[in-house]
Image (cartoon, rainbow, N blue to C red):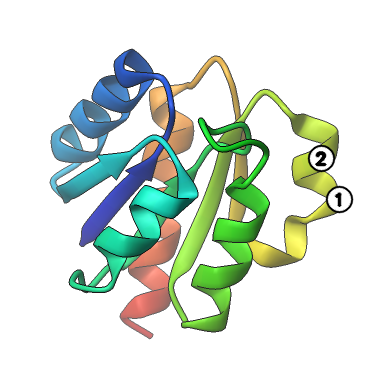
Amino acid sequence: MRVFCLEDNPLVALDLEMMIEDAGHECVGSAGSFAEARSMWQDLDLDLVFIDIDLTDGKTGIDAARWLRERGTAGCFVTGQTELAEAHRDLVVEIVTKPIDEKAIERVLALVQQSGSS
């Protein structure tokens, strides 16, 4: 699968990218803000986006999840903002809380891959 990371912390993004690739998928990019990501997504065919809620341009992860959902791309919140993520659960396939557990990331990847092959 082709996966993107929307995360403002470069170390967390790098960690996520490694988890994605270790699970046998392709990380096609990352961005720290919704504005930056949206301009990149125009040219990418994505299967899943891991989305932090707090980004460099504010709490725009929710807007990103909504934007992706409207276009049929799966999103997963990866955040410490658990209550905010739960309030917008309908926008994503899953919520992973920080600190990130690699097994949780693997479960989300498997879930999205399985739903895409049905």
Q: Residue at x 55, y 58 (%)?
A: 64
Residue 12 image offset from top left, x and y in percent = 37, 19
Q: From this viewpoint, is residue 84 visible?
A: yes
User: Mark 2, residues whose alpha carbon is within 10 Å: few (<14), some, or many (≥20)?
Assistant: few
Front position in the image: 62 or 75: 62
Q: Circle 2 sits in a helix, a strand or a loop, which is it?
A: helix
Q: Circle 1 sits in a helix, a strand or a loop, which is it?
A: helix
The picture quadrant where one finds residue 106 is top left
Residue 86 image offset from top left, x and y in percent = 81, 46
Quarter of the rendering occupied by the N terminus = bottom left
Say which residue label 1 marks. Answer: 87
Quarter of the rendering occupied by the C terminus = bottom left
- From this view, report whether residue 92 is shown above or below residue 84: below
Q: Residue at x 27, y 54 (%)?
A: 3
Residue 63 image offset from top left, x and y in percent = 64, 59
Front position in the image: 59 or 93: 59
Q: Which disc number belongs to residue 84? A: 2
Q: Which disc number belongs to residue 78? A: none
Residue 33 image offset from top left, x and y in percent = 45, 41
Front position in the image: 7 or 27: 7
The picture quadrant where one finds residue 13 is top left
Q: Is residue 7 left or right of residue 93?
A: left
User: Mark 1, residues whose alpha carbon is within 10 Å: few (<14), some, or many (≥20)?
Assistant: few
Q: Does the CB distance between marks 1 and 2 fall below 8 Å?
A: yes
Q: What is the tally of numbered marks visible in this picture?
A: 2
Amino acid type shown at disc 1:
Ala
